[in-house]
Structure formats: C-alpha cells, structure tokens
Image (cartoon, grey):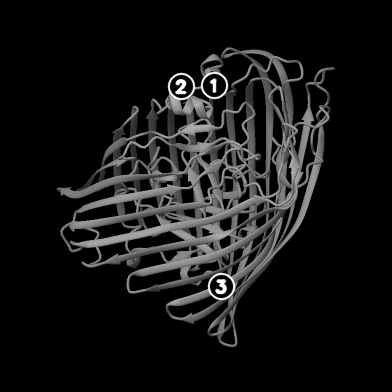
C-alpha cells in the first residue's frame, strides 16, 4: 500500500504486555531493559489490507519503513539509521517469523514473506540488545502468529479492493483441542501499480500445527509458501521526471522489461520442553528453497558485465538449541539463558545478457555460500527490589565463499572465501523507580558483515572483494518508561559509532564495488506516547460498551546520522565529513487518533511527517520533506453467528505530490520513487 499508515493500537488496557525480544524469555514489556515495542495485529478489525509491514509499524519510534510502490524491490526498513544503504531487501535488521529466521546468514533479509493476514503481533527491538541475535546492528523484528483454537473450529474470510487495481482476498481456517490444533490460511493480493510498469501479483499459503504430546512439551510445526509470479519494476526517476509525471516509469524499465519473479517454500519446527520446574529447552530446525529471476534495467552485454538478468536458485536452513533457567537469588528472580545456533545458505547464481526483456548469452555462473555459527549466554538478575541487571555476550562466526564457474579473459576468477569473527557483549540496568516508572540504560558492541552481493566484485576488476571488512558499532542508550491511568509514555536517547561502514566505491557495467569507511555516527531521540480517554474500554462484541471513547498516539524520531570522516565516493568525488547518511530523515513523526461514537463504529485519522531525505553520499540530491493525512473508518456487526467488519480508508486526502522513498546512491542518478496521490481502499471481513 502507498501512504497507508499503521493501524492504531488498541487501548492501553488491551495492549499485549509480554515480549520476548530483549531477554529471549517472557517478561513485561514495561520492565524490558531496552527500547522494545509490541504492536498488536487484529486480522479482523484492521483497516488496512495487511499486505505489507509498513501498514502496522509506523507507530514505532526509531523505525523507518517505506512502501516503495515497487514489489520487485521489497520494503525499505531501517532502525535508528541502520539499514538505509540497502537498495533491495532488508539490511542491518534481523527478521524472524514465529522464531524462524527470515534473514539469511550474510545479513540480507526479506520482509515480503511475513504473513500479516494471520499475525497476532509484531515485536521490534532497537539498540544494543539486538546484538544478541548476531549479524545485525540496528534491531530485531519478529512477527508472531496466533496459536490454533483449543475449543473447536474458527474461520475467517476477507476481501477488498482499491485504487490502482488493488484487490485482496483471503481465507483462514483453524481448529483443535488441548492436545493438537492447526491453522491454515491462504491469501492473494494484486495491483496494477501506482506507477506505469508497476503491476504485481502475490499468493501465499501458511500452515501451523501445535501439538502438546505430554505435560511440559510443546511442538510447533510451520509451513510457508510464497509465490510472486509478477512484480514489475518501474525503476527510480530523476527529480525532473518525478516532478513532471510521478506515475511514469523510467525508459529502461519498459525497454528491458524490468521486474522479478519469486517462489519460496519453507518448513520448520520449534520444540519447547520443560525439563524441571526451573529448567527449559527450546530447539528449532528449519529449511527452505527460493527461486528468483530478475530482469535489471541494463543489457549487461559488455564482456566484463555480470549480465542484465539474474537467475538464482537458493537452498537454506538452520538449527538452534537454547537452555533457560528461572531461579532466585536472595528471594529475587535470577534467569539464565544460553544457546547455540547454525544457519547456512547456498546460491546457484547465473547472469545473462538482457536482450530487451529476453534472455541472452551467459555472463555469470557461480555458487555462493554463507554460513553463520553463534553461541550466546545471557542473564537477567533482580539484585534489589528496585534494580535489575541484564547482560550477555554472543560469539559469532560468519563465512562467505564464492566459487566462480565462468572464467574468461574479460571475466576473471572471482572465487574466494572470507571469515568474520566477532564477540558482542551487552549490559543493561533497569531502575524500577515506581510501579508506574522505569528508567534503563544499556551499552553494547555489535557487527554487521557485508552481504554476498557486496563482496562480489573487486576494486581492481579481477576477483572478488572478500577483503571487505565487517562493520562494527559501539552503541548505548538511556530510556524512561511510564504508564498509568490509560496512558503510556516512553522516551530513549541513543548513540552509535560505527567503523568500517560499507559504502559504494565504484560502479562499472552494472557491477557495484564497495568499500569500508570509518567514523559513521548515529544518534538521536525516540519518543512514543499512547493514551485513551473518556468512555469505557471497547468490548470484543459490538453493542457492549465503548461508546464515546477516544484513543490517540504518536511516535517521533530525531535522528542525526552523518559521516564523521571524509572519503572518496563512487564518482571519485570527496564526501565531506559531516554529510548526512542518505536515506535518513532528521525528523519523523506519526500521529493517530480514533473515536468510537458508537460501540461498533470507529472513526480515525492519521498524520505522517518526514523531513528532507538525502539520496546520495554527496548530499547533492534530496527528497523534500512532506506531511500527509489519512482517514479511516470501520464498522462491526453480526449476521447470525457470523461477525462481519466493513472498513474503508482514504490515504493522502490532500492529494499531496511527494517522494515516498529514495534509492540510495543509484548509479544512474534515478534516485526518486514517487508516492501515490489520493487513494482509497475498502474491504469486508467475516469471522465465525
């Protein structure tokens, strides 16, 4: 979706109060020693199609998530300025779905495969404690789906349509008892695209089985199938093109029929076993395949090129085992956890000449592999009724390897391996000043390896760039959390210094070469508030209270992200010390308000504001700041035993022309991806 913003969270009394992201064990979100948000997702009452994570995460401060109107390149997701350099997929943020990694061992992740249509909540962990999950610097995002019902059968169906040929439909079935239950959901989404050459089709099937064969043992099995047979890529535009006609596609898009097809299949199992009253084990095992074919906006005909068509055949998988002990010391809680994990991926990657949309001669043929091994230990100790100490350490080893099978005088051998090792400690302290007030601080050190894409090509034109170093960061934050009488307020100050940041060095014939630079700084302020006023807490069923209730919230982020040292960029020009990191807004604000004049009716409004965003390291190209406003409404009613919910929304009601996202350091100067003007979507959901 385009300008669609987050579905407002339910009232404070109904917010999920349990998170697992910070300490890997369940605890109150309010007591977590870090900036962590748990965003509830209601597949029945959400006033968005629930296709993209950008629909639900705008209410999280510190998170920038932008729908690019380009299903070929996925969302842009960054946390505290980490991940902004990614031109496709997600970097700098580790992704999980029900405990299964959606980020590959080299640090590249995909947000598109998350099943929002059957999700229960999304957790976002920001700051130093993200280092406990390995190859990530900015944060961790986890999507959780609900367990099957334990008392019979449930069913849900949905459909909706909107501007630019949008159409969504889905169905979910579930049933079970105390011992065995399962859910199955399937959905599709189609759009003609806001921009020319921007059509897409998606299909997804997800299954979950939960078994409890014995007391203290729980087995969760998962299966996911994702198919995107059409995802056209309109490419970026120059500023002049975006101003003249934001709906147009770049000429190269139609010439080379740019776009991507993806098919991914994954299965996994998670076993939780209570060994004793204080000891428990968790194990996971998963594996999958991913087939991708992508047409780029260039021919790739030059002998030294890697081709304009990419064909990838991936297999991946992993396993993990962790132990948790819940005990006491001096009558106060003391929890320990430790674990090991291993993940691997193997890509068969070929590249071909793009002959105006058809496959030509071979230009690349290699086998790429990435593995990561990790071991961690973590503790959570309430050493005083008012004080809590949390800390841990993680040792990580990431290995990247390239086996080049296409070796010619114009395309030398790119084979090689590189291994990255890191020890990442983190320490946090929480002061429970009052029942309604917590203050925390933490410090940590993390790392982020280059991806296989970033090490593919050497600056010399011969071989790979496996000498590229991993980025390391030192991070700290201080925060405060307060909640009382239907109000919740959280604020955090953060600071991060990075060395060996990965940035472009050169671009030749479609081959981007990367380099390391030092002195990158990210610091800022996050502020989040949510409150409810008047009326009673809305009941689960219409007609049972909640009339006259007002709920509101805001998320504000101030981010000062800049290069501390000068360096030479891909055009051989000097990037001055003090230049802002491209892709980052200094100020970001999201606010929403919802009013329930009648129990079954909800009316809402949203506002999103972003300041100027630079598109290149030189800070010569920028997307202007903007403010947009959205309206939404939903109405719940019954027909016999069936609950129905009809909703509608209008995004960008003032029809503002603005740039929704930028392609950082785009080699052809086509940096800008325009966002839609005024847009609508209406839908109907039914549940048994």
Mark 1 secondary-structure assignment? loop
State the separation of the CA atoms marked 1 and 3: 48 Å
The image quadrant where one finds the N terminus is top left
Counting residues from the N terminus, which is met first, the one under dot 1 or under dot 2? Answer: 2
Residue occupying the point 17% across, 49% down: 637
- Image marks 1 and 2: residues in contact by CB distance under 8 Å: yes
Counting residues from the N terminus, which is met first, the one under dot 2 or under dot 3? Answer: 2
Q: Which residue is mark 3?
A: 440
Image location of residue 84, percent across then percent down: 59, 44
Residue occupying the point 17% across, 57% down: 597
Counting residues from the N terminus, which is met first, the one under dot 1 or under dot 3? Answer: 1
Mark 2 secondary-structure assignment? loop
Q: Choose top left, top right, bottom left or bottom right for residue 281.
A: bottom right
Residue occupying the point 42% across, 56% down: 39
Residue 376 lies left or right of residue 223; in this view the side is: right
Residue 254 lies left or right of residue 447; in this view the side is: left
| Of the pair 83 and 53, the residue shown nearer to us | 83
- Whether residue 536 is situated above or below residue 118 in the rendered picture: below
Mark 3: few, some, or many residues within 10 Å (few <14, many ≥20)? many
Can residue 183 be seen at all in this image of the molecule?
no
Residue 258 — which label? 1
Q: Which residue is mark 2?
A: 197
Mark 3 secondary-structure assignment? strand
Image location of residue 392, percent across then percent down: 67, 67
């Amino acid at each position: 979706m385009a300008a669609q913003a987050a579905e407002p969270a339910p009232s404070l009394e109904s917010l999920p109060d349990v998170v697992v992201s910070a300490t890997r064990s369940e605890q109150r979100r309010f007591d977590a020693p870090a900036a962590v948000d748990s965003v509830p997702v209601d597949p029945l009452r959400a006033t968005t199609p629930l296709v993209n994570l950008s629909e639900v995460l705008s209410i999280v401060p510190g998170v920038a998530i932008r729908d690019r109107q380009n299903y070929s390149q996925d969302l842009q997701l960054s946390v505290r300025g980490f991940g902004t350099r990614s031109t496709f997929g997600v970097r700098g943020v580790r992704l999980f779905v029900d405990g299964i990694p959606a980020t590959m061992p080299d640090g590249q992740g995909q947000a598109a495969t998350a099943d929002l249509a059957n999700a229960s909540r999304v957790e976002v962990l920001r700051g130093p404690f993200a280092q406990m999950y390995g190859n990530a610097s900015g944060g961790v995002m986890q999507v959780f789906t609900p367990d099957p019902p334990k008392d019979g059968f449930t069913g849900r169906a949905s459909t909706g349509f909107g501007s630019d040929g949008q159409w969504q439909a889905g169905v979910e079935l579930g049933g079970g008892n105390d011992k065995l239950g399962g859910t199955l959901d399937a959905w599709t989404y189609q759009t003609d695209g806001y921009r020319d050459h921007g059509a897409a089709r998606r299909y997804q099937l997800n299954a979950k089985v939960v078994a409890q064969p014995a007391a203290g043992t729980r087995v969760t099995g998962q299966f996911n199938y994702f198919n995107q047979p059409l995802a056209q890529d309109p490419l970026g535009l120059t500023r002049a093109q975006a101003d003249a006609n934001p709906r147009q596609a770049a000429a190269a898009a139609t010439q080379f029929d740019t776009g991507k097809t993806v098919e991914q299949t994954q299965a996994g199992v998670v076993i939780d076993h209570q060994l004793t009253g204080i000891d428990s084990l968790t194990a996971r095992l998963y594996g999958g395949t991913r087939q991708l074919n992508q047409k780029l906006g260039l021919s790739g005909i030059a002998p030294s090129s890697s081709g304009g068509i990419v064909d990838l055949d991936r297999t991946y998988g992993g396993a993990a085992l962790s132990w948790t002990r819940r005990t006491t010391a001096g009558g106060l809680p003391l929890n320990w956890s430790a674990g090991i994990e291993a993940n691997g991926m193997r890509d068969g990657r070929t590249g071909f000449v793009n002959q105006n949309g058809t496959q030509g001669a071979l230009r690349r043929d290699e086998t790429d592999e990435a593995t990561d091994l990790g071991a961690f230990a973590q503790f959570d100790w309430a050493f005083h009724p008012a004080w809590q100490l949390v800390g841990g350490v993680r040792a990580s080893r990431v290995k990247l390897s390239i086996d080049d099978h296409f070796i010619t005088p114009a395309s030398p051998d790119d084979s090689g391996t590189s291994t990255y090792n890191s020890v990442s400690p983190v320490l946090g302290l929480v002061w429970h000043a009052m029942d309604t007030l917590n203050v925390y601080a933490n410090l940590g050190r993390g790392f982020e390896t280059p991806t296989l894409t970033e090490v593919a090509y050497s600056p010399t034109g011969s071989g790979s760039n496996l000498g590229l170093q991993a980025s390391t960061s030192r991070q700290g934050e201080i925060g405060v959390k307060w909640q009382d009488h239907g109000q919740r307020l959280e604020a955090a100050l953060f600071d991060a210094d990075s060395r060996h940041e990965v940035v472009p060095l050169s671009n030749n014939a479609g081959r981007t070469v990367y380099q390391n630079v030092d002195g990158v700084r990210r610091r800022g302020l996050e502020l989040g508030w949510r409150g409810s006023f008047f009326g009673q807490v809305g009941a689960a069923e219409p007609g049972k209270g909640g009339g006259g209730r007002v709920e509101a919230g805001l998320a504000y982020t101030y981010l000062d992200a800049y290069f501390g040292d000068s360096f030479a960029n891909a055009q051989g020009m000097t990037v001055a010390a003090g230049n802002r990191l491209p892709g980052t807004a200094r100020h970001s604000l999201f606010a929403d308000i919802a009013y329930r004049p009648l129990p079954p009716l909800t009316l809402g409004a949203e506002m999103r504001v972003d300041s100027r965003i630079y598109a290149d390291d030189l800070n010569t190209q920028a997307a202007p700041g903007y403010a947009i406003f959205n309206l939404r409404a939903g109405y719940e009613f019954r027909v016999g035993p069936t609950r129905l919910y009809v909703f509608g929304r209008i995004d960008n009601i003032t029809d503002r022309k603005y740039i929704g996202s930028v392609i950082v350091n785009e080699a052809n100067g086509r940096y800008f991806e325009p966002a839609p003007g005024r847009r609508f979507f209406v839908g109907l959901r039914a549940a048994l």
